[in-house]
Image: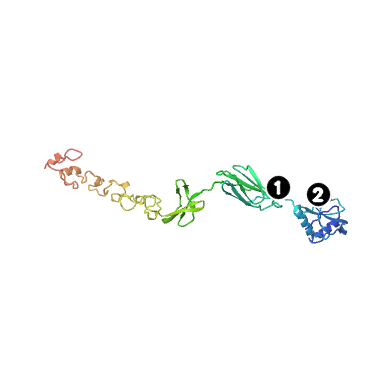
């Protein structure tokens, strides 16, 4: 729509120009009888003020707008018998719209190279109402100490020190000024590595091996958590991207979480050493509910007479025979009866006769007599 810019108070001029607004193809006439004066066509420039446009009789409104846009002017139409200085511009062309600075550039990314970093980005989603005229790259190590303008959406910064991390950001500019900085990105340039070792497992992707030492040709690589079974590990020596040699080896993986030498798949007692079986019952102690070394049905921790049957108590004194010095309870120790030739497991068999004086009962004076 064309809203009229005019000088004076002629309502007819407003009406006529409003009629122009209904159709962008209406011709502009030299003389408008309803406007009580000549209708001229001009443009407003920020420095020179009102200037005429190169339009002739028969030029349509749409054509006048195009001419003004091409020159970067704001189109106005005034009555010739009014003071142009009092005529405000009508915002009908690009130049009439108040532009703002552009927004933040999008997708800023950095790629490090040898003593250089390549940047690329996309234009801002919001150009502020005016075309983006260029960009400014800011960079530095620790802070933005350098900058330079570019017209494209990519730039390469050379002359950087390898091994030093640099920060980068970019701004966009238009006729209204410079927009805000994009979120910084970082990159560390480095010299190219000539020799590398790459590793692949079971025909999968190749990965650069860790810790390759070209001087000793030694390398190592953690291939990851492989499942149990056989796997093929391949390695190749690369020289600036070209393969110089290769080798492969087949390995067998057995996971042993508790380190007892038995693979997890066959572990009878996970988390414990399967080889520790004090009572020899085939159940590892870590999973044995009853560790009974002497097999008497009493756990070792509760065993009164370890190594012997706690239930065997010939004389009923509460001391298992395996730990009872006088199993038959006849008052003579097992050792005494053994020396006298009597049966230590028979209370009726005890030393008699001369042996009583020679082998008195334990714990007191002789209480037997010679027969």
Measuring 16% from the left and 43% from the top, which residue is drawn there? 339
Measuring 18% from the left and 42% from the top, which residue is drawn there? 336
User: Is residue 42 left or right of 184 when viewed as pictured?
Assistant: right
**Image quarter of residue 360:** top left
Tell me if I can see residue 331 in this picture.
no
Task: Please tell me the numbered disc located at residue 177.
Answer: 1
C-beta proximity under 8 Å, tags 1 and 2:
no
The location of residue 70, given as percent across then percent down, is 75, 55
Q: How has the structure been colored for display?
A: rainbow
Tell me if I can see residue 134 in this picture.
yes
- The residue that label 2 is drawn on is 49
Give whichever of 197, 243 is nearer the camera. Answer: 243
Give whichever of 229, 59 is nearer the camera. Answer: 59
Count neighbours of disc 2 (C-alpha within 10 A) and say few if under 14, some if 14 to 19, many if 20 or more: few
The quarter of the picture where the N terminus appears is: bottom right
Secondary element type, mark 1: strand
Mark 1 or mark 2: which comes first in sequence?
2
The location of residue 64, given as percent across then percent down, is 79, 57
């Amino acid at each position: 729509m064309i809203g009229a810019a005019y000088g004076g108070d002629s309502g007819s001029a407003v009406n006529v120009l409003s009629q122009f607004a209904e159709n962008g193809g209406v011709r502009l006439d030299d003389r408008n009888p309803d406007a009580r004066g000549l209708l001229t066509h001009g443009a407003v420039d920020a420095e020179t003020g009102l200037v005429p446009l190169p339009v002739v009789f028969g030029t349509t409104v749409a054509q006048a707008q195009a001419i003004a846009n091409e020159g970067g002017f704001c189109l106005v139409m005034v009555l010739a018998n009014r003071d142009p200085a009092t005529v405000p511009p009508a915002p009908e062309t690009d130049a009439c719209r108040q532009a703002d600075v552009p927004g933040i550039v999008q997708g800023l990314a950095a790629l490090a190279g040898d003593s250089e970093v390549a940047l690329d980005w996309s234009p801002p989603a919001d150009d502020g109402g005016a075309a983006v005229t260029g960009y400014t790259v800011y960079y530095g190590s620790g802070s933005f100490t350098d900058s330079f303008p570019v017209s494209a959406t990519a730039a390469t910064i050379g002359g950087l020190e390898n091994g030093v991390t640099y920060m980068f950001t970019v701004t966009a500019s238009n006729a209204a000024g410079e927009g805000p900085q994009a979120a910084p990105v970082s990159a560390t340039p480095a010299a190219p590595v000539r020799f590398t070792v790459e590793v692949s497992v079971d025909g999968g992707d190749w990965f650069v091996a860790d810790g390759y030492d070209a001087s000793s040709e030694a390398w190592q690589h953690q291939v990851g958590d492989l499942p149990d079974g056989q796997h093929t590990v391949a390695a190749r020596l690369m020289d600036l991207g070209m393969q110089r040699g290769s080798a492969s080896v087949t390995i067998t993986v057995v996971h042993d979480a508790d380190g007892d030498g038995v693979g997890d798949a066959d572990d009878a007692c996970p988390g414990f050493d399967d080889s520790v079986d004090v009572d020899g019952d085939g159940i590892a102690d870590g999973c044995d509910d009853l560790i009974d070394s002497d097999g008497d049905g009493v756990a070792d921790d509760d065993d009164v007479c370890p190594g012997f049957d706690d239930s065997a108590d010939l004389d009923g004194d509460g001391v298992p025979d395996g730990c009872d010095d006088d199993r038959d309870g006849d008052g003579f120790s097992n050792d005494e009866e053994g020396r006298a030739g009597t049966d230590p497991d028979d209370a009726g068999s005890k030393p008699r006769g001369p042996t009583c004086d020679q082998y008195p009962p334990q714990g007191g004076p002789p209480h037997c007599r010679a027969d």
